[in-house]
Image (spheres, helix red, strand yellow):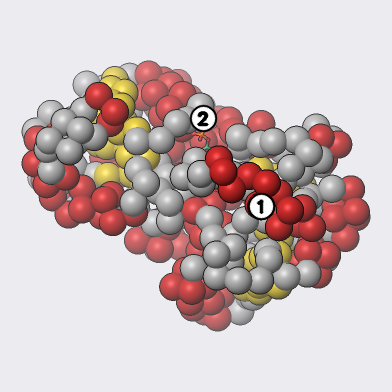
Amino acid sequence: MRHLLTLDDWTPELIEATLELASEIKRVPDQFANAMQRRTLLMIFEKPSLRTRLSFETGMTRMGGHAIYYDTSTSPMGAGKESLHDTAKTFSRYVDVVMARLFKHSDIEELAQHATVPIINALTDLAHPCQILADLLTIREKKGDLRGLKLAYLGDSNNNVTHSLMIGCSMVGMSVAIGCPDGAAYAPQPEVVQIAQRWAKAAGTEVNITSDAHAAARDADIVYTDSWMSYHIPKAQLQERVELFTPYQVNQAIMADAASDAIFMNCLPAMRGYEQTAGVIDGPQSVVFDQAENRLHAQNAVMVKLVEAATNNAA
Ligand code: CP
Ligand code: NVA
């Protein structure tokens, strides 16, 4: 059974084919109006969401299918009354595909281990692959060929979006520079760095991590940041994190280090005056709402690919 738990579960060829399909779905949506006819998507949420819930649910509607929103706070699983094993065995008898937004990455791995339908990671503390497929689609639209581009990511880097960007970009031939404070608590996890560096070596590109925000941003084609206060970070850490991450804020000076035609990205939600200034996110280089829209098209392509693979598997 093929799932999407992290991008390196997939091959670069499958990622490229999915981006191609996403562009096609975006260009001629009517041709995919029945692609999910009589199919049901289960959407399991342990954390909040605007984009992920709306884009998956709308995506199913547009392709002729149905989506069920399932909040774990009102579920036997969330109440500790039902195991992940039994939950996965049960939902596999009803639905065709599942997306889950969970805290622990090991929980989504356990669901996938016992499910007989495809599981899509819609964000765990470790990874956010759907976001990065949408980002790559957006970058392709703005810049053309992905190969040879440099993406700079600044800010909290012990972070799901950072991890998936490092892996996704290096799989498709892009270089990545991370600018973050020193120390394991704020830097990408070492296993992720190793995976990204392996892909980068194969592609002849680079993955660099530095505490110098300006060095990271230098000549970048894309400047990317994410929240300093991810959903799983306790509110009590706000002050400490603002002090730590302020040198990594994306502002006009950082954008001036990047290429003159660089684009600015943020997966959203964003806080103006924190991880970026209002001038940057609301300015002409920002593509954040194109990014948000592309969640819909990229995920539709993911669902088509996974359901197709599962159907062929069963045949
Ligand atoms: N970017 C993203 O996943 O947004 P939500 O948390 O609103 O789903
Ligand atoms: N890193 C952020 C991404 C939100 C889409 C978080 O986990 O909250």
Image location (x, y in percent) of residue 161 = 54, 52
At 63% from the left and 44% from the top, the residue drawn is 238
The one nearer the camera, 39 or 29, is: 39
At 34% from the left and 54% from the top, the residue drawn is 105
The one nearer the camera, 238 or 218, is: 238
Q: Secondary structure at mark 1?
A: helix
Q: Name the quarter where the C terminus is drawn.
A: top left
Image location (x, y in percent) of residue 226 = 63, 47
Q: Secondary structure at mark 2?
A: helix
Question: Can you tell which mark lies on residue 51?
Answer: 2
Q: Are marks 2 and 1 in contact (CB under 8 Å)?
A: no
Q: Which residue is mark 1?
A: 240
- Closer to the observer: label 2 or label 1? 1
The amino acid on which the numbered mark 1 sits, given as a three-letter code, is Glu
Residue 206 occupies quadrant: bottom right
Label 2 neighbour load within 10 Å: few <14, some 14-19, many 20+ = some
The amino acid on which the numbered mark 2 sits, given as a three-letter code, is Arg
Image location (x, y in percent) of residue 292 = 59, 33
- Residue 191 visible, this orientation: yes
- Residue 20 visible, this orientation: no
Image location (x, y in percent) of residue 213 = 78, 64
At 79% from the left and 50% from the top, the residue drawn is 250
Q: Would you say the beta carbon of the disc 2 residue lies within 8 angstroms of ligand 1?
A: yes
For the residues marked 2 and 1, what is the alpha-carbon distance in whole angstroms?
A: 28 Å
